[in-house]
Amino acid sequence: MMTANEIRESFKKFFEQKQHAIVPSAPMVIKDDPTLMFTNAGMNQWKDIILGTRDPEPRRRADTQKCLRVSGKHNDLEEVGHDTYHHTMFEMLGNWSFGDYFKEGAIDMAWEYLVDVLKLNPEDLYVTVFEGDPKEGLERDDEAASYWLKHVPADHIINGNKHDNFWEMGDTGPCGPCSEIHVDSRTEEEKKNGPTGRELVNKDHPQVIEIWNLVFMQYNRKADGSLEKLSMNVIDTGMGFERLVRMLQGKHSNYDTDVFQPIIKAEEQITGLNYTTFEEEAQSTQKSQPAQEPINVAMRVCADHLRAVSFSIADGQLPSNAKAGYVIRRILRRAVRYAYTFLGQKDGFLYKLVPTLVHEMGDAFPELKAQQTLITKVIKEEEDSFLRTLDKGISLLDKAMEDLKAQGKTELDGVQAFRLFDTYGFPLDLTELICRENGLTVDEKQFDIEMQKQKERARNAAAVENSDWVTVLSSSAAEIEQHFVGYDYTEYSCHILRYRKVTQKKNEFYELVLDYTPFYGEMGGQVGDAGVLVNENETIEIIDTKRENNQSVHIVKQLPKDPTAEFMACVDIDKRNASAANHTATHLLDYALKQVLGDHVEQKGSFVSPDTLRFDFSHFQKVTDEELRQVERMVNDMIRQDIHIDEHRDVPFEEAKKLGAIALFGEKYGDKVRVVRFGPSCEFCGGIHASSTGRIGFFKIIAESSVAAGIRRIEAKTGQECEELLYQLEDTLKAVKSFFNNAKDLQGVIQKYIEEHDTMKKEIESFQAQAVERLKENLVDKAQMVNGVTVVKAALLPINPQSAKDLVFKVREAIPEHLVCVIGSRYQDKPLLSVMLSDDMVKEHGLNAGQIIREAAKLIQGGGGGQPHYAQAGGKNIDGLSAAVDKVIELASL
Ligand code: ATP
Ligand code: MG
């Protein structure tokens, strides 16, 4: 039996023999694409080739791609764990042809691989073809069917509708019919007694499932819904690796293969619970105990989610409370919930499974191995903090249920259930479960309404409307591709190729694509260029430049009057130079951090703008002041050496690695890369840099902090920003010196000052205490008896709030019973009312100092409160103070 690792290799080998270039998986986490957070299909990384904005060579490619289907168009999250063939993260094996072979080649190769190489039984295989759609003017894909007939009998070919057999990248963009290959993996007995496999295709039968989808892209869907033919036909195939392994290993569940079993075994060991495989379940005479099913589901959920979360952390996406980070956080929390509820794990659990995962997959995916410590730390911290939240949520729910019972109600408010979901990660089913155990129900309708409202809010916030691109200049296909000349020029003559209108939150702007541009589009943490488009007739301001599908997209507020005219594209040089210097400084910083802290330092994010730079990296404790100073010295030393940039463009990826360039995990690199070297610092980088390190001027770290478990952040300034910083510091210091008569030994003088201040403070406090003591004696002497109660009062004592408090407590010490004490005091022209009652006045006479003071404080235009026996209230109206004091006596009804 082939192992999973062997099967992965066999796929690559097969397509290599068919002249395909074997390429690495793109990162699972997508950066720099506003339309997609995670890779959800193998074709994502070829989007720009398919759209025609990138060179298609080599035209045949194959890979295994890490995919995540937990958001957007493909979201399988809720299935995961309950069925046995959908995962959040899975590998998609794929082969591509960009204008090379088409339907026949793709079908023949798929068949050859599955049947001739892997020896799957052809009788178990069924294929689907697109049945056509009159509304779209599309006919049945007879062409694909005719090629399938070479391999399978007609009754193994099934017509499929637009939903299953017409593949679209999104609302717009490349699309076309597809053919899926399904496998009937039922047992012989089931096949004999049940319906034919044909009848079960695409019917959600757990043993008749799709394994491979061959997409024949031949159209482009436009914003108005119409289809146009693509200039180049594309083959895009995707086969679920875990499903293929299951078929080849003769299993009936993906989780029973060696992809998942080691993880599940580890779960069994930690929890002391058993997982039952499909076979074990079939063999046991009676259906497995009902109590076993939730354990099985929970173990599958944890095994699956562990992979999703670990791979995403390795790709640089940590759990957080926004966007992609939030999606990852929700996956992790789902796993924690299952482990907590069904596997009895009240402490962190998933992080203990990381070593097994790394052992199994670390060879095929070295990013896991290299970052094992980080992955473990992040997961553990995230688990711990969510478990604390869960505890809090549970006690909130307990309280809510108590209140309900006290009110004689039996239904929990949907708003409350939603708040538990939204703030504490309690999904409705968990809340319902806990409520049911307490004989209560949940208002699901209201919950749904709240959920809908929130979705609406999110949608409105994110709503972006793109119109179709309007082509301005299209002479030949070659010119559709944009030329970026920004490494060598800051001004260049150009034409507009195309533009489109974008509406976002009622804001309108235009995006322009130029044939030649010196403008750098925001990427790799470096902000985009700003500048202008000019000719003799007009000047158009470019407010920002973004990067999309490998192109610089220029953002402008208005279109030129004549979009076909020739322009000069001019970058704002001051801003550009400042961000270039900051970018170069981040490279030097990266290098210095590795030298000072060690090789475990991995870049985890950066932000480079004209006025600042930020650099996130993995490191497991605070960077000390000495270490920071060492880093600064090293960077500034490299700046003074004025090292010239040594730049290599279009270097093949492998060669760049040999140059010693540092590649980042989770970063997408093309076949050809750019390498930027400044002396010992050498990195893969597409950014804009200073021509030499001297241009940075000076480098100063201004902050070091933690952004997440195991991730530190350094913020720094360079050049002119440092100069400003220095002036500010100098001015502050000058001002401080002048306070101390420009003393020479400033530190000594301040030190002495502080000591004197401390001594004086102590003396004053002791004087105040004495004064309070005298006041107390005085007041107690003058106390009056009213109806058996001792009334101590004063209206306008000039003492501070703390003394007023001390005073009433001292009075109570002196007169512990039958006491009503009220003090009006003033401090810095503000009135203050303090009330103190003896315990018997509260318990036996039902008085409440807090309530009394709220009422009386109105007379000083103030408010306050406190406990039943003691309360204070401040106010604004000093003239009302003595009336307020009398009011207190009155309210005490004496
Ligand atoms: P299904 O109908 O089973 O959800 P799909 O139509 O969503 O599959 P495609 O988008 O065509 O699948 O993806 C190509 C292949 O990737 C599928 O044939 C399948 O083998 C695999 N695949 C898709 N989704 C998942 C998933 N969530 N987990 C594991 N494999 C998957
Ligand atoms: Mg699906």
Image (tube, rainbow, N blue to C red):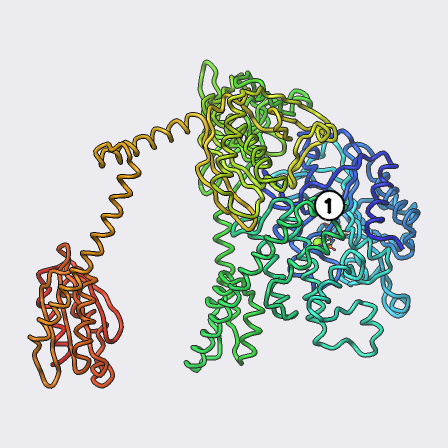
The answer to whether residue 224 of the structure is visible from this angle is no
Amino acid type assigned to the residue bearing label 1 in the image: Phe
Label 1 sits on residue? 365
Residue lying farthest to the top in this orientation: 536
Percent x, y of residue 537: 45, 16
Q: Residues within 10 Å of mark 1 (few under 14, many from 20)?
A: some
The image position of residue 261, as x and y in percent, is 78, 60
Image quadrant holding the N terminus, namely bottom right
* Residue at 22% in and 70% down: 871
Image position of 733 with respect to 8: above or below: above
Pick the front one: 162 or 775:
775
Residue 80 is left or right of residue 707, and the answer is right
Residue 876's x, y, as percent? Answer: 15, 58
Q: Is residue 691 above or below residue 83?
A: above
Among the 4 quarters of the image, the one containing residue 331: bottom right
Q: Quadrant of the C terminus?
A: bottom left
Question: Vertical placement of 427 versus 675: above or below?
Answer: below
Question: In screen coordinates, is 191 left or right of 509?
Answer: right
344 or 30, which is in the foreground? Answer: 344
Residue shown at 53% from the left, 69% from the top: 444
**Along the line of sight, which residue is nearer the eye, 790 or 389?**
790
For ligand 2, the image quadrant comes to: bottom right
Please provide percent x and percent y for residue 115: 91, 49
Against 278, is 134 above or below? Answer: above
Q: Is residue 847 visible?
A: yes
Q: Residue 592 falls in which quadrant of the image?
A: top right
Query: At 84% from the left edge and 49% from the top edge, which residue is drawn?
Result: 7
